[in-house]
Image (cartoon, helix red, strand yellow):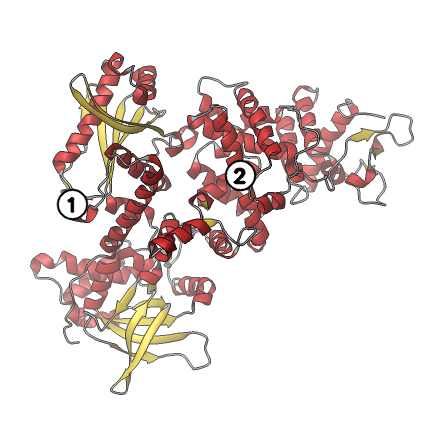
Amino acid sequence: MTAQSISPVISIEEEKATEFADVLREQVREFAETEGNDPLLLDGHLLAVSMDYLEDQGGVSTDVGDDAVGSDDFVRCPFKAKVQNTNLMILGYLPVSSDGQLTLFTARYEDDPATKTLALTEFRSRVEMVLRCFRMAYNNPEALQGIREVRPLVDHIGEHAERITELRVVFVTNLRLGTKEYDRAASFGHIEVVYDIYDVDRLYKLSDDTFSPADIVVDFREGLGGAVPCLEATGRDHFYKSYLLILSGTTIHWLFKRYGPRLYDTNLRSYLDNKTKVNKEIIKTVKDQPERFLAYNNGLTATAQEIEIETIHGQPCVTRIAGLQIVNGAQTTGSIYKAQEGAKKQGGADLSQVAVAVKLTKVASEDLREFVPRITRYANTQNPIQAADLEANEELHRRMEQLANDTWCPGQAMRWFYERTRGSYQAAMNREGTTPKRKADFKRQIPKDQRFGKTDMAKYWMAWSLYPHLVSKGAQKNFDAFKKIVSATDGGIPIESVDETFFKHIVAMAILFRAASGAVADAGIGGGVGSMVKAYLTSYLSYRLGDRLDLDEIWQNQAVSPEIRELLDAWAPLVLERMTLNVGQHTTEWFKKEACWADVKGLSLDLPAPLPPECRAPEQAAAPIHVSEPGAGHGLNTVVLADLGQVCSEGEGPLDLDDDVAVTKAMTPDQWFEASKWAANAEGFSDWDRDFALDMAKQANRGWPKAPSEKQAKFAARIARGAMRAGVYQLR
């Protein structure tokens, strides 16, 4: 194989990070339009934009488990001034975690990041201002007591001073680092100090927003030595095309240096480094016997969305590939790269002598989701693949993205935007808004406040579905719980049900949640507690009105009625009061427990008469159950209903109390809740029975998406019959 002339390589990560810096700048400028643009505020806007990326990857988490502190607990306190001849600066903080870590934030925004890097002196200066702020709050809090911006931080440090064992300073910038020699640790008496730096490259790697396999474009005519001869291996009637070709080791090295692990996005595994036995042997062959590589190695299996073929001197040749993915051969690709990089000091390996067999398959975009995973799975069956290697199914979010693009609000003037990948709204605006007029049109059609992402959808759905205690655990933990619930085979969301109606109902839930958020804010309930009350207030509204609230009506109006808003305004402080009924030392930790939600469900707040206009007459809603008095002929074998048609379909007759499943499903959510309270203190029943009844109330409120099993119904009916005998329900 002859040597090829390969052009210098610019990493796709570096190229995409530069594009990502433009996205960050536009997001900061959006904040600046409404909230101000002095230098301190711009730094704060950058931190606000970056916080979502940090949260997604655990960059702001300070603990694990139920006691974790994350971005939902972030307290904003932008401050920069000279106090007692000392320059201070801070942008915000996370409360002290259970293991004693206090996290402080600072940032450095540059409007033209392409021309500068972060100097070591500037980094040290900003970090030192944060440390001075902490020292003053810790040792001399009186000096800061009159400063409104930092008062929450001063009070928090004073309250938890004895618990603080580590101080973490997070520095965020949209610049690139000018050196690797940044300070990483220091100390303040017994308190350890650590620094965490997020520059634009690191933020981009966290975001993973602007990259897709379609971005991997290989043009063999530009810097890769020319077109590559190939052999078509499929007949003309196949819906896909496969080609066999040989790539040089030099080309493989260029591909990995340019695109790195992005080449493996659809692979079950990435490169496992050069420590495994197989990879060591691959590297040894490259170095010692490169001419035998083709004979020894199985080669690569790859797919592409586009393959351009030209006939050159009668030979079909691949000239360009778009959407390249290596679905089998990650170890081969990575090992060739490692062999060259590791041998550079000795002059480098002769990769021009390495020939790699490639089976390249073109797959149409409409077949990608079904065909590529099968190629990936079958191509990897020669070695065991662990279940943990498999990527999560994104079909729900892909459907939501497509539905958002296709579904217009009533009037056809606006639509909602679903950010399947963070930053995609800004990217779409940049793509569509090529002129000021087009940008204005984009914002008019898709207002910024009509976008929501994965964690937002999870928050809206979970709050509406009566999981406020899980929403209160923070965006990422709630999203994890949401994924488990909706993907469960028992009671999950079938993917075929994710249609236009589903999308409209999610938007309606968003509108309701935001209305609850407005009520909480107007009640003066802020901070981390406020975010939790929003979830509880939404869940309580769902619990009390449930199926009577017409989500289609809310979608049609794109707003809640004044009556719903008045109801939320009245309930907000009362819900918070109930949340604190049994609170212990750690208020917010109590709000994350299901027992707190059980307390809130015990509220009996008045509903207005008439009900808000979004409320429809209950259909198939269970009426109160009345047990016939002894001697009436049926004893406990028959439940007589106030309105038989409301529970049993017309003509079914009275409900047979010997049918455990029927009894379980006949109970309303309120009746199950009353039964749970009774079971907690009734002889022969326990806390387990109380909790089981609460679970039944939840299922009843959801309309019994799946009938209870015989075993579940046996336990449930025992509780129901006991409550009936005790007179918990009205007898006649």
**Cα distance in 3D space between marks 2 and 1:** 44 Å
Amino acid type of the residue tagged 2 in the rendering: Met
Q: Is residue 297 left or right of residue 514?
A: left
Q: Residue at x 34, y 31 (%)?
A: 62
Disc sitting over residue 116 in the figure: 1
Question: Where is 131 relative to 401, above or below?
Answer: above
Residue at 15 percent across and 56 percent down: it is 342
In the foreground, 157 or 612 = 612
Residue 562 rendering spot, x and y as whole percentages: 59, 33
Residue bearing mark 2 = 462
Residue 164 figure quarter: top left
Residue 356 drawn at (x, y percent):
25, 70
Image quadrant in which you'd find residue 313: bottom left
Residue found at x 77% / y 31%: 624
Left/right of residue 621 with respect to residue 518 in the rendered view: right
Looking at the rendered structure, the kind of residue marked 1 is Lys
User: Which residue occupies the extreme front position in the image?
Assistant: 437
